[in-house]
């Protein structure tokens, strides 16, 4: 078995060399395939971790007798002390390793190799934006009949208001989308009718009162939203309770409801969501709330995971963002969209899904709301606004802190594992191909790689070598300089993609928490559904640093 446990060592891509220093391309652009792979025999085993405690990055310290082993995450003995988050301080508790109780040999399905794919693709991954990038690769071709009906009802309900409005605007908003042809297929969402007046009339008005002077239309609208599992604005306290359920009723949960906090137009907490996407597939079953309360078994969210590829010449990619998300903001949502643009432009990968993995409550960080709230807020943020993002509650539900390398390994098990896992992507010839998994992180998180005692070196080799990293530039951190200076990052530079923020967004969860505490508006910094949840659950009101 190869050093990474599953597959042959990551390939050297012909001709890549230091190409990215040429021309005007910033360094480290490249297909995300590690040039050298991780050093041989890296392991999550605690004894191995100790071996790598050395702060030297010299590869000669990476002893060949150590083995990286895939593991069932649930078989990992939790390590005794949760690390203190030291990303922002130097008082680190060294990351501790976990025991591998059972390596899982030979349980992985056979995958066809992705290696040859990389070499034939554009490697201009950095600053390679085409303005007016193609829409989401997630197709909307197969809209269920009830959903299509609901969209029609929504349009019908809005028609009178639209008719009374600006005719020019109407004609613009109803103009047909480019009709799909064979070439466009998959590039343009198909028959999702445009939702008129998405952002107007003012969101602060109760929906019924402006959207439909005709009560029949209002009724149709209510029925349609209920058919979708969404709940109308005026549903009252019962649905408010659902919203606060911590995810127990994920599929039928309300985004925006009347709640016991009442409606306050000035604060605008009950406003609608501007970016409502009626075609977003919803999870079925109990949702994460029951799991996090210990009342239901863990279920890996798969409702937006693509199982087959549109273009099998690409590499199937799943993007995972680990972090606090206390609370999730529009920046955290934008990170995924920025990554998507970069990936689409690169033409190397096909995005199969994106996941948030909120850290558990054992991560000792100031201002960390309890895990169930952070998971639920992430769910609310994506539930009706995204067709490809999901929230995995596994990490949040663990009884001990889980290192990021372990979390990524968990995703690998569930996506590529052969037992409870998906077993990879099913190709048209019946073969399976591994999902590539990459960590999505901001520049600040990556810079914490260099802080002594925060990350273990073997883990960094696993994260950067076996998986890979999408790094979103962050104002105030010089990602390029850091990539040059950090030995392990440099070693795996072919597996690192840096994403330039073309519109700088520096929304900070810390500041959002402070705004809440000071009674200031947080509107337009995070989705309304999340704002509502924060107020309903009285989060971030305690003393500074408290949840
Ligand atoms: N402004 C930003 N630009 C780029 N990446 C960011 C930005 N803010 C957060 N991130 C990234 O989002 C991920 C999750 O962030 P996380 O919630 O853990 O921290 P945070 O947003 O900095 O919150 P806090 O203010 O509570 O420290 C991390 O990878 C982080 O680097
Ligand atoms: O795996 C590690 O050793 C490790 C060390 C430091 C931080 N992390 C992860 O990085 C994320 C940090 O988030 P934050 O809010 O501290 O920026 C969070 O998901 C942590 O679990 C992980």
Image (cartoon, rainbow, N blue to C red):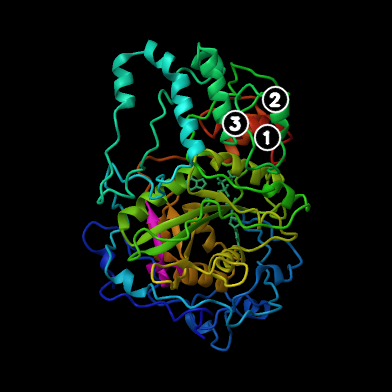
Query: Which range is magenta?
Result: 488-499
Disc 3 designates what residue? 226
State which tag comes first along the sequence, 1 or 2: 1
Query: 27 or 524: which is nearer to us?
Result: 524
User: Outermost residue toward the front?
Assistant: 145
Label 1 Cα crowd, 10 Å radius (few <14 / some 14-19 / many 20+): many
Height in image: 10 above or below 327?
Answer: below
Q: Position of residue 325 (x, y in %)?
A: 60, 46
| Pick the front one: 321 or 154 | 154
Nearer mark to the viewer, of 3 and 2: 3
Q: Do we see residue 201 in this rendering?
A: yes
Label 2, on which residue?
259
Query: Is residue 342 covered in magenta?
Result: no
Measured in 3D between alpha carbons, the distance from the residue under mark 1 to the one under mark 2, in whole angstroms, is 9 Å
Element marked by disc 1? helix
Which is closer to the viewer, label 3 or label 1? 3
Task: Count every numbered label the image shows and give the total.
Answer: 3
Q: Is residue 184 above or below residue 430?
A: above
Which is more N-terminal, label 2 or label 3?
3
Location of residue 475 by image quarter: top left
């Amino acid at each position: 078995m190869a050093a990474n446990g599953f597959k042959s060592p990551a390939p050297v891509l012909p001709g890549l060399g230091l190409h990215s220093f040429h021309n005007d391309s910033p360094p480290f652009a490249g297909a995300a395939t590690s040039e050298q792979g991780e050093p041989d025999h890296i392991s999550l085993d605690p004894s191995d971790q100790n071996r790598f405690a050395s702060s030297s990055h010299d590869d000669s310290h990476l002893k060949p007798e150590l083995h990286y082993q895939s593991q069932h995450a649930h078989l990992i003995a939790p390590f005794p002390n949760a690390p203190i988050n030291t990303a922002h301080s130097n008082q680190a508790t060294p990351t501790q390793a976990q025991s591998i109780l059972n390596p899982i040999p030979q349980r992985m399905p056979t995958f066809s190799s992705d290696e040859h794919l990389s070499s034939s693709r554009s490697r201009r991954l950095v600053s390679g934006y085409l303005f007016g990038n193609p829409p989401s690769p997630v197709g909307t071709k197969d809209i269920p009949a009830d959903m299509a009906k609901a969209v029609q009802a929504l349009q019908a309900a809005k028609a009178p208001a639209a008719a009374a409005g600006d005719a020019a605007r109407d004609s613009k908003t109803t103009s047909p989308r480019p009709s799909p042809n064979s070439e466009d297929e998959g590039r343009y969402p198909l028959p999702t009718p445009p939702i008129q007046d998405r952002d107007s009339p003012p969101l602060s008005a109760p929906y019924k009162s402006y959207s439909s002077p005709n009560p029949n239309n209002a009724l149709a609208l209510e029925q349609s939203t209920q058919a979708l599992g969404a709940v109308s604005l005026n549903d009252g306290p019962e649905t408010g309770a659902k919203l606060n359920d911590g995810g127990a009723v994920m599929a039928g949960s309300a985004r925006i409801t009347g709640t016991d906090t009442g409606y306050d137009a000035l604060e605008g907490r009950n406003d609608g969501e501007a970016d409502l996407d009626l075609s977003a597939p919803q999870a079925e079953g109990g949702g994460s709330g029951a799991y996090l309360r210990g009342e239901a078994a863990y279920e890996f969210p798969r409702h937006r995971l693509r199982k087959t590829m549109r273009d099998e010449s690409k590499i199937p990619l799943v993007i995972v963002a680990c972090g606090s998300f206390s609370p999730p903001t529009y920046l955290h949502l934008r990170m995924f969209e920025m990554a998507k643009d970069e990936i689409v432009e690169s033409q190397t990968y096909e995005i199969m899904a994106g996941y948030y993995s909120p850290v558990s409550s054992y991560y000792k960080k100031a201002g960390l709301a309890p895990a169930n709230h952070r998971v639920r807020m992430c769910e609310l943020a994506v539930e009706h606004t995204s067709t490809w993002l999901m929230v995995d509650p596994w990490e949040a539900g663990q009884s001990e802190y889980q290192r990021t390398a372990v979390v990524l390994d968990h995703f690998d098990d569930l996506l590529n594992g052969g037992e409870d896992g998906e077993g990879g992507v099913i190709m048209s010839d019946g073969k399976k191909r591994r999902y590539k998994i990459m960590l999505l992180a901001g520049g600040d998180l990556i810079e914490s790689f260099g802080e002594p005692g925060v990350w273990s070196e073997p883990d960094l080799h696993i994260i950067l070598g076996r998986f890979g990293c999408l790094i979103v530039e962050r104002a105030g951190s010089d990602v390029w300089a850091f990539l040059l200076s950090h030995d392990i990052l440099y070693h795996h530079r072919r597996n690192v993609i840096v994403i330039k923020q073309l519109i700088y967004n520096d929304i900070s969860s810390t500041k959002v928490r402070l705004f809440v505490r000071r009674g200031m508006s947080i509107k337009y910094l995070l989705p309304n559904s999340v704002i509502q949840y924060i107020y309903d659950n009285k989060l971030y009101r305690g003393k500074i640093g408290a949840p």
